[in-house]
Amino acid sequence: MEFSIKSLAPEKQPASCVAVGVFDGGKLSHAARAVDAVSRGYLRKLVRNGDFQGALGCTLTLFSVPGVAAARVLLVGLGKEEGGGGIGEREYLAATRAMLKAIADTGTKDALLCLAEIAVGEHDTPWKVRQVPILAHETAYRFDQLRSKKDKSRTLLAKIVVNVARVSLTPRTGEALRQGDAIGQGICLTRTLGNLPGNICTPSYLAEQARALAKTHKLGVKILEQKDMEKLGMGSLLSVSKGSRQPPKLIVLEYHGGAAKQKPVVLVGKGITFDSGGISLKPGPEMDEMKFDMCGAASVFGTLKACALMGLRHNVVGVIPTCENMPDGAASKPGDIVTSMSGQTIEILNTDAEGRLILCDALTYAERFNPSAVIDIATLTGACVIALGHVVSGLFSNKAALAEDLLAAGRASFDRAWQLPLHEDYQEQLKSNFADMANIGGRPAGSITAACFLARFTKKYDWAHLDIAGTAWKSGKEKGATGRPVPLLTHFLMQRAGRSK
Ligand code: BES
Ligand code: MN
Ligand code: ZN
């Protein structure tokens, strides 16, 4: 897909499709009015006849509209107009998504999109423009590499022109378009890695993908093998992989976009390529979804790819502990006590609370990068799905300013997070009679006690934890990885890079 920004008269462009917005109730947007004028009231007549009312997300494709150079005119319902004459961000995203989907369903190869001219809440033009390639990649995304017959019926939308007012043709707007393209591609990578099944996407496969990503984008890459981790004393991480035939890996990717002396942001992603629960075996129904237990890792891959593609001016390190959690004669057992790289001992009361066991050693390892902040991303607890559902990710942090930046990035990218507390009082629940701590804290506040466990390994730096158990993938008919929280993470890094200029 190729993206560009222009300021054109929509009615004069010989594109295969020009998309214009109509507000709920039939009021025409600026671009729609231009089309209406050359076609002598064609759109107004349609609206008057009740053929298109502008309800949010509704679309209507018109062919050979009189006086219009484009082969098709796509009307896009914008929903209710707000006081100031624009629409809300939720409406803008829904309308843009509907527009791109409608275009993908026709034979359109190139399109001129005129929704970015519409006022959207407090957002500026770069924000509106950035969303277009993100959503274009999202709607074009298919996961069909494992089907014997591919769907060839669709013509791919190859060229997208985002139309903006002439005053908005600034370098910042152009940069936003490239950022959106980069973020969109990062999201696609995250989704694909997430969607790949556990028999293909093994720890070794992820290590290979890391090498490939590093080669394409000139990243530093290092893969620690089991023996390296043994030398480092990563007894907690290794206790999880013990029951698996697949060797564990610790993947390190380094993106150097900032000054050599700039402290990096370290992203640590949970990479359990299949979580059976281990000896504390999970129940059968929906267990297939535990192939998604590496979505945190996948989001680190996707974020680094996006950083590299957009040429982000900041240093970012990805640390990915990856292994399988399987039952076996050699697997860890409830009651086993292991020693983490930090020296702290852990009583494994439930082998299904394995995410924190691999993360804690990766978090200790992260110290060596002298980070300005460490953010871990993990499908960590079912309790987070109960608390927050599938709308927001759970956020925890030992630094208020870092939490605020992440929450703001979530709002700006519509990939929202919600902060939960880390009060000392919860630490009580992790007490063990035999070791420094237990790996579970009982049923109450399960996401918080999981985060409290991690907090014991992150005292040396500013740290935040994103529990993406409810947001990383969808279940049911639409089963598949979402690519979250790549939008949040990339926005966070872009903001930080902007500030450190
Ligand atoms: N990967 C799971 C968390 C999970 C479960 C994410 C369901 C999304 C949907 C994690 O490793 C796990 O099994 N957590 C346990 C912790 C418990 C044993 C304290 C859980 O949430 O049940
Ligand atoms: Mn588990
Ligand atoms: Zn897990």
Image: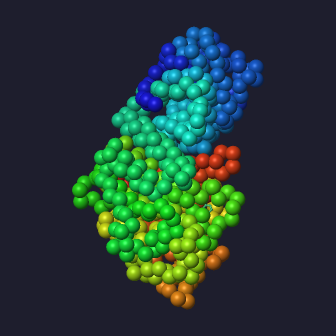
For residue 428, what is the image quadrant?
bottom right
Which residue is painted at 56% across and 66% down in the image?
A: 326
In this rendering, position of residue 387 left or right of residue 226: right
Observer able to see residue 215: yes
Which residue extends farthest left? 260
The colour scheme applied to this rendered structure is rainbow
> Number of numbered discs present?
0
The x, y position of residue 79, in whole percent, is 66, 36
Which residue extends farthest right? 49
For residue 469, what is the image quadrant?
bottom right
In this rendering, position of residue 22 left or right of residue 212: right
**333 vs 183, nearest the viewer:** 333
Which residue is painted at 44% across and 38% down in the image?
A: 181
In this rendering, position of residue 83 left or right of residue 2: right
- In this rendering, is residue 290 above or below 442? above
- In this rendering, is residue 94 above or below 59? below
Observer able to see residue 85: no
Which residue is painted at 53% across and 81% down in the image?
A: 336
Which residue extends farthest front? 329
The x, y position of residue 250, in whole percent, is 40, 62
The x, y position of residue 315, in whole percent, is 32, 55
Which residue is painted at 37% across and 47% down in the image?
A: 213
- In this rendering, is residue 479 above or below 115? below
For residue 91, what is the image quadrant?
top right
The x, y position of residue 152, in whole percent, is 57, 27
**388 vs 327, nearest the viewer:** 327
